[in-house]
Structure formats: C-alpha cells, structure tokens
Image (cartoon, helix red, strand yellow):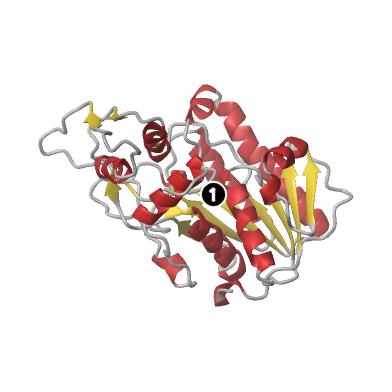
Amino acid sequence: MESSLKNIEKKRIFLSGGTGFFGKNLLEYMNTLNANGAWQGELYILSRAPDRFCNNNPGLITLPNLHFIKGDIRNFEYSSLPTFDYVIHAATETDIKFIVEQPDETYSVIVDGTRRILAMGAEKQAKRLLYISSGAVYGVQPPKLPKLSEDYPCNPENAYGKGKLDAENMCLASGIDTVIARCFTFVGPYFPLEKHFAVGNFISSILNDEDINIHGDGTPYRSYLYATDLAEWLLTILLKGRANEAYNVGSDEAISIAELAKVICKYSASGNTQVHIAKKAKAGAVPTRYVPDVSKAFKLGAKIKVSLEEAIKRTIESAKGVML
C-alpha cells in the first residue's frame, strides 16, 4: 500500500456522487485496497437509485462493509447515520448540455447539495471533508500561461464553475476540517463516451470503426490523468492535504486535441481510422489551454503512474470488455 495512504485502514467514509465516473473508480480502488488488506473500514454511498446501480455494477459492490443510502444530494435523510471519519463530496452534474440549458438547476445541485453535506457534517461532526471541486473555478486559462496553479485568481464563466467556487467557500466557512480537490480532465474505466468530452468521443469513434472528426482546429491543449491515479490522488489529498487549502488534480503533461486523436487512432481495430479536422488554425493564434500545475499535489506524494498512451489503451480495453 502506498505510504501516503496509511492510517485509512479502519475508517468509516461517506461518499456522495458514488455512482458516477469519480465514484465508480473510487469504489473500484477501495475494492483493491480491501482485497490487499489495506482497508477494512466502512463505506456509505449516497445514490438516488442504489438498486439500479447494484444491478448494473455487481463487480463493484463486493466490499464487506458497503452501505447505500437512497436520496437526493439536496435533501437526503442523515439523522440516522453514524459519525464519519471522512466525507468525500463528489455529487455534481457535469453534462455540458444540462449545464447550458439548466444553469439554475446546475447551480442548485452543487450549492444546495453542499449545504446539505455541511449540515450533516455539523450534526455528525465528520472529522474531515474532501470537497471535489473543479478547474472550472479558474475560468479561462490565459493561452500563454502554461499551467494553472492554485493561487491563480478564480473567475468562473458558467453556473457550474460559479457553483463550485461558491461551494468551496461554503465548505471553508463551515468550521469543518476541509480540503479541496480542483479536478481537471481524466480518462479510464466508466468514462462517458457519449457526452461532450473529446477523449470519450474519439474512443467511441474507433470502437465503432468510424473516423474521428474534430469540429475545431485541433490546437487546444488538454491533459489527462488515469482513473487509478485519480482515485489515489483524491485519497492522498484527503489524508495528507492541509486544512482549508485547494489542490489541483490532473496531469500536467499537455497534449493537443489533434495529437490526442492520433494517439487514440493507434488502437483502431481496422487500422483504417482517419482524423479529420474541420478548421484550419489561424496564423499567429495561440492555442487555448486547460492544464493544471500539480506541483502542490506532488509534494503530498501524488504521482502520475500511468502514461497517457497506457491510459488510452486501458480505457479502450475496459470499454470493449476484452484485451486488445
């Protein structure tokens, strides 16, 4: 077990957002820790539809002390719950279509959901809260700034980013021991292939033996952290992060969208997949970026263990259900 994850062996943890991409990979990681004897605690997961989740994911519900709580993040009942050593609050809405079309509802899920978590924390005196925030709190990254650090001024653009920032401030003002993870972009098992994320769309294309179509000019830079690294980073920040501080979570190894598409093309079953770029880059234009500075998390012991190519390969293998 990683030295950074010591002292979690018999802890009781509450996880909201436990049935999404983050939650599933955290649950899978906890299963691995349990199988290795590194964690023998209790995990409580909040879900609006726990029966459906359990039926659809039998391989994820093998922990001996796993409990599901049925309810909405904004009004779930917590009066009968025990005291928790740690609360990981990850429940949110990330679908860009939903965010654009329903900004008020997006903001409510984030802020009112956090208010409910804080009420539970105050009542049950949770020892520590990890709030899963987002790099969206920073707003637009200046194109000439290679990486966004935690001290960059926050200026979120939409309801999602504004909600995350307001929720951060609520957590910090609550008096509960809080640490914040500002998450960027990821890839791995359970990653949604049908939503607006470029990496998911590209993987979906090659799984369907289709060409990859880039609607822009392919120049924007992103970075991708693999799911097992993500889970380990979150637990590392939970256990070792300084109270009332934020830590960026993600890879600092930038890649353009066009180059990402080329990497994914290597795993085309037919070998005939082509990349089509709709627009030509403007002369002299500086590509946009969304890349974090993660040196602060590195100081806690977080590491990038899975390369991007290996992360892509594993994600495709998971999506196909067979080894390539």
Asked whether 198 or 79 is in front, the reply is 198
Above or below residue 189? Residue 250 is below
- Give x and y (percent) for residue 141: 33, 46
Asked whether 126 or 49 is in front, the reply is 49
- Give x and y (percent) for residue 25: 58, 52
- Give x and y (percent) for residue 103: 54, 27
Rendered image quadrant of residue 40:
bottom right
User: In the image, what residue type sits under mark 1?
Assistant: Ser
Above or below residue 221? Residue 97 is above
Q: In the image, 90: left or right of 140? A: right
Residue name at image x 61 percent, y 48 percent:
24
* Marker count (numbered): 1
Above or below residue 90? Residue 247 is below
Residue name at image x 76 percent, y 65 percent:
41
Q: In the image, 146: left or right of 22? A: left
Residue name at image x 48 percent, y 72 percent:
301
Residue name at image x 36 percent, y 31 percent:
209
Rendered image quadrant of residue 221:
top left
Mark 1 = which residue?
133
On the question of residue 223 being in view, the answer is yes
Q: Mark 1 packing: few (<14 Cα in 10 Å), some, or many (20+)?
A: many
Residue farthest to the left?
Answer: 283
- Give x and y (percent) for residue 323: 46, 49
Residue farthest to the top?
Answer: 101
Q: In the image, 264: left or right of 138? A: left
